[in-house]
Structures are given as C-alpha cells and as structure tokens.
Amino acid sequence: MADLRDLYQQIIVDHSRSPRNCRVLQGASLSAEGDNPLCGDHVTLYVQMEGERVKDISFQGNGCAISTASASLLTEMLKGKTRAEAEALFESFHDVVTGAPYVEKPGAPALGKLAVFAGVSQFPLRVKCATLVWHTLKAALNQIKEPVSTE
Amino acid sequence: MKTASNPSDHKTTQPLAAEFNLLQIRQDFPVLKQTIRGKPLVYLDNAATTQKPQCVMDAIVGFYAFDCSNVHRGVHELSRRATESYEGARLKVQKFLNAAESREIIFVRGATEGINLVAHSFLRPTLQPGDEILISAMEHHSNIVPWQMLCEERGAILRVAPINDLGELIMEAFEQLLSPRTRLVAITHVSNALGTITPIRHIISLAHGKGVPVLVDGAQAVAHMPVDVQELDCDFYVFSGHKLYGPTGIGVLYGNSELLEKMVPFQGGGDMISSVTFEKTTYNTLPYKFEAGTPNIAATIGLGAAIDYVSAIGLKNIAAHEHQLLAYATEAFARIPGVRLIGTASKKAAVLSFLVDGVHPHDIGTILDQDGVAIRAGHHCAQPVMARFGIPATTRASFGVYNTTAEIDALVAGIYKVKEIMG
Ligand SMILES: Cc1ncc(COP(=O)(O)O)c(C=O)c1O
C-alpha cells in the first residue's frame, strides 16, 4: 500500500473531497475548458487578471481525485502570481509529475504544496489527470477557445 | 439454478454441468497464470475484450506457420488450405448463430464495421428526408454515431427509445416511437454499460408487425448466451470476435439473404467482383460482394477456433456460470456501505456497473489495479447512458467464462481498500 499512499497523499485526498475555489468566477476576464476523454474528466477554469497578475482564479468540474486536487491546489498557488510565474510553475509541476529530475527554473516560484504530486510519476496512466488543469490554464492565458483535450 | 443467497454457494462455484470444469478452463488461458505486482491477475474487464485460450493462438500461429497464403485465388496447395480454413470458419459462424445459409455470414472488422456496412449499403441508398431510425438510450457509441452521420447527411431523424431507472427499455415508449416513417430499428442485445438484456424477441416482433427491419448489436451477447438468428427473426446481427475469446480485427455481420442481395457493396476492390472492365464491373455473389480486398485470414481462422472452444463448453453452461457469478457479486456489493449499482434490470448479463460514494471511478481503477484487479472506469463508450443516470462515469466489472467467486472476493476486498484510502 506504500505506493498508493504516495499517490493519494493526505493533502490530495483532502483537496479532492473539499476542493478550494470551486465555483464560477463572475466576470472572469479569461476562461478555458479542458477534457480528458479517456476518463470523462472535465474542468472549466476562470481567471481574473489585473494587469500581469492573477487577481482571482477558480474552477468547476468533474473528475477524479487527482485532477480535482490538482485544480484545487493550482487555484491556491496561483492567486497573486504573474503570468510568467504561472508558466514557469507549470514547467516545474510537469517535471514533478513525470519524474524528471527537478531543476530550479529561473523565475519559477517554489513548488510548495504541489510537491505532493511527486507520487503521480509512479503511475504513468494518471499523469494526464494531474496536468489537465495546467494545460487548461495555459489555454486560458493564451485565450484559446477550443477546449483542451489530453488525447 | 443456485444463487448467492444460498450460503452453501461459497463452496460450490464450479460444476453446474459435468462438462463445465472451471479449473480446466482457467488452464486454457495462459494470460491468467501471471501475477501483477505479486498478486494473481484478476481479469474483470471482459466486456472490453476477453482473453484468448491457447487453442485460438495455436490456430493463428498454425495458419502462419503452415498454411500462409491468400484465399480464393491460388492454384497451389497452401491457398487451398487457407481457403478451406477461412470458409470453414464461415460455416462455424453459421452454425453458431444458426443462420439459414453460410452466404448470410459476412466477415468484417468488428461490430462497428458491421453496423457501418448496414448504414452504408442498406439504408443510405434509399433514406429520405424525414425518415426515422429508432435506437435505444443504452446503445454503445458504435450503434449511435453511424446512424447520426447518416441522418445528418440525408435529413433523416434519429429517435431514441428511453430506459427506466433500472436500465430497462420502456416498451410502451418504444412501441409509440415505431412510426410509419421508421426505416430501421437498431438496438443492442445486451448493454455494455448496464448489463441489461433487452427483450429482443419482442422488439423484433413489434417492429416486424409494422414492416420495420431490425439490426441487433450482439457485441455483448454472443459470448454470454446462445443466439439463434432464425429464432430471433432479426434482419441483421453483428458481433466482434475479440469479445468472444477470439482475436481483434475480425467480426461478423449476419444479414438475411433477401436483404443482402438487394444491398449495394460497402467497399470496392478485389474479391468482391466477378468481372471488371473499364466500362462496367459485375459484383460477386454473397457473401463476397461485401468482402473487398484480402481479408484478415488469420483472425478469421482464430475466430473459428474460438467458436469451437465456447461451443465445446456450451453457451448454456457459460450463461449459467456467469449468472451465478453475477448473483454472487450483486449480493456481495449490496453489503458494502456506500456502493450503488447502476443497471439493475431484472434480466442482466455478466456486467456489474457501480459507484462508490465520493470516489471517482478512475481512482477506484488505479487502486484495484495495484492489487492486480483489472476493471474498467469511465463512460464505456456510452455517454448517453451516463447522462441518463446523471453521472460522468462508472466503475465496471464484467465477467467471463474463466472468472471465479474468489476473484469477486478479491474485487470486494479491493473496494474496501478504496474506501480506506480515499475515506
Ligand atoms: C454493445 C457494443 N456494441 C458495439 C461495440 C463495438 O465493438 P468493436 O469496437 O469491437 O467494433 C461494443 C464494444 O465495446 C459494445 O460493447
């Protein structure tokens, strides 16, 4: 059971059960949708920018514990960050969930709680669940209208 | 037939009939001998695809090792043998479905291609704007999308007969939807997402009463119960070899010869012609009119071996064994708190779709997989069924001839572990 506890860490289970910032953000300046057709996960991400900074961010959706916790923690982490910091953080996050050696990215904020997703790297089938909301964030920041798909 | 409510059942998984020897059957499937992360493989994803017995693999290897040749066109010994085995498989399918004639058996890639063939060759040439195609609310995407595409192209209308909360077809509604404009009823024999066995004989007689032909999607039926197309009186019946312990890439379309004769070819090419000039091509007779190009010879021979295999065990015995497993699992699941079954029709085949309170099916899939228990999590290519029940996905365990009650115990233990980890 050791491996499973690496994946389903307490923080992840907690965020999947009571996701933070899980609501529609009225008047959000940016939004995007993401789908994981394989398992039916769906997420809508709302971002309110103030200049280059994320003023507020929220999500709504339907998904597994990994994708829900990832979305919840993303919204917690990104409030107040700049666009460049958000993108740098995605790169670090991607390294963590795919098990790539961690290299500090210039300008990237500290991983903080996102480090709990390291266990995902032992479960290659679940990497897409963890990254769906991050791909969706990228689409929102770049104002891509087509829904993002992990397939 | 015993059910799991009989306490003595725990000890008596095996013989319902003398010839049903579960231990021997398990020996026939090499894949089942492996362990996954140190635990015995518990394969409960049979509705997606079944495992293959050694005899099916031997038939495929035997073809390539000794008889490899093209069919219907060689003068040499190998081609004679290949053709004999290929056509022999057609006779096996004919007998398996009790079709009146072997030319009513068309080899296709799978159930999906069989349905597309009927859409293209039977309905498309004559479908008019305002005509209707009637399906049910529990179809696999394969029995929705081809009709939807055709309706869009021709301005026809797709009608959907609803299901109740148990996952049963609502017959009164079905009857009302059968209209003078209905050109075809296309309906599943067994639902892959819910396990419901539809009252197919009754459906066909209602449709025929109004002069409407019926296509039956038998993808989830043929491995789990005897099927007799003459007794059903269906016009078309499709299935895939890979869900019948046979290889992928081969399936069957049964069609009533009167209808098949009138239909236009599906694809053009070699084998489907009797003569070709640049001015005119004359099509070959049935079944070859619908089998353009070199077929999947090895897989067809493999399918023949799979049919021999299940026929030797007996479809009635398989049905009885799986019914016992389903009853045992249904009862065991009823005792787990916070578990809800999706699909509780009074007539069901070997499918158990369920939800665990507060846990997403995908997470259940990962946790069970850690213990070697293979199930499916998702929408099962039946998103409208999920929408009907207001859920995005389910976890599905589906049983086959080689499954045991001990494996269901492993599944149940896995569900308790899920609750512990995600609790
Ligand atoms: C009820 C039903 N119909 C059709 C299909 C499609 O079968 P195939 O993908 O082998 O063509 C399936 C397979 O999942 C099925 O369960």
Image (spheres, coloured by chain):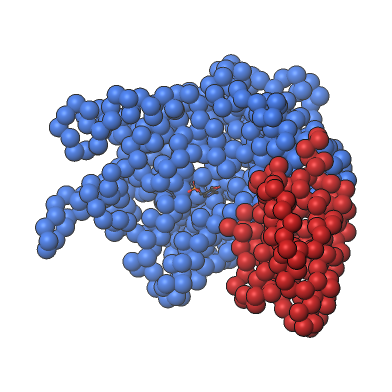
Chain colours: A red, B blue
The residue nearer to you, when weighing B353 against B34, is B34
Q: Quadrant of residue B58?
A: top left
Q: Give above or below for B150 relative to B193.
A: below
Q: Position of residue B68 (x, y in %)?
A: 28, 30
Q: Give above or below for A132 relative to B338.
A: below
The residue nearer to you, when weighing B415 against B255, is B415
Quadrant in which the N terminus of chain B appears: top right
At x 53%, y 21%, the residue is: B28
Q: Quadrant of residue B280?
A: bottom left
At x 61%, y 63%, the residue is: A149
The residue nearer to you, when weighing B9 against B145, is B145
Q: Give above or below for B42 relative to B12.
A: below
Apparent side of residue B199 relative to residue A113 in the rendered image (left or right): left
The residue nearer to you, when weighing B291 against A123, is A123
Q: Position of residue B301 (x, y in %)?
A: 36, 32
At x 33%, y 37%, the residue is: B297
Q: Position of residue B207 (x, y in %)?
A: 49, 58
